[in-house]
């Protein structure tokens, strides 16, 4: 998948986010998917959680570290 899709999946608008920004975006996305908004459609929420986790892992290891 394209990195742009991963950015969009996590709600990141910057083109070169730091690891901290990726973590925060991931945490916010997971909190949203775990909220009562998706209580009626847990299967959809689980699918989106898997996608968000994949996006997080791909972006986290390709982003610049805080030391860079």
Image (cartoon, helix red, strand yellow):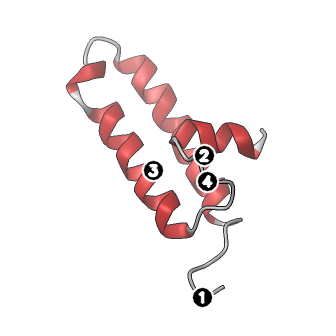
- CA gap between label 3 and label 4 equals 14 Å
Disc 4 crowd rating (10 Å Cα; few below 14, some 14-19, many 20+) is few
Classify the position of the N terminus by image quarter. top right
**Circle number at residue 14:** 4
**What's the CA distance linking mark 2 and mark 3?**
10 Å
Q: Kindly identify which numbered label has been placed on residue 67.
A: 1
- Residue at the far front: name it: 14
Q: Which one is earlier in the sequence, the residue at label 4 or at label 2?
A: 4
Please tell me whether residue 16 is drawn above or below residue 33 in the rendered image: below
Name the one closer to the observer, 46 or 21: 21
Marks 2 and 1, how far apart in space? 24 Å
Q: In terms of sequence position, does the residue under pointer 3 or pointer 1 come before the other? A: 3
Mark 2 or mark 3: which comes first in sequence? 3
Considering the numbered disc 1 on the image, is that residue within a helix, a strand or a loop? loop
SS at circle 3: helix
Circle 2 is placed at which residue position? 54
In the displayed structure, does residue 60 sit left or right of residue 31? Answer: right
Which x, y percent locates residue 47?
50, 27
- Identify the mark nearer the N-term, 3 or 4: 4
* Front: mark 4 or 2: 4
Separation of marks 4 and 2 at Cα, in angstroms: 19 Å
Q: Quadrant of the rendered structure where residue 15 is?
A: bottom right
Furthest residue to the top? Answer: 40
When the figure is inspected, residue 33 is found, relative to residue 38, above or below; the finding is below
Q: Are marks 2 and 1 in contact (CB under 8 Å)?
A: no
Is label 1 in contact with label 4 (beta carbons under 8 Å)?
A: no
The answer to whether marks 3 and 4 mark residues whose Cβ atoms lie closer than 8 Å is no
Q: Which mark is residue 26?
A: 3
């Amino acid at each position: 998948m394209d990195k742009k899709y991963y950015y969009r999946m996590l709600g990141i608008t910057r083109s070169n986010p730091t690891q901290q920004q990726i973590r925060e975006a991931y945490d916010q996305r997971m909190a949203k998917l775990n909220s009562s908004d998706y209580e009626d459609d847990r299967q959809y929420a689980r699918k989106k959680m898997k996608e968000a986790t994949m996006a997080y892992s791909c972006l986290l290891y390709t982003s610049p570290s805080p030391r860079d």
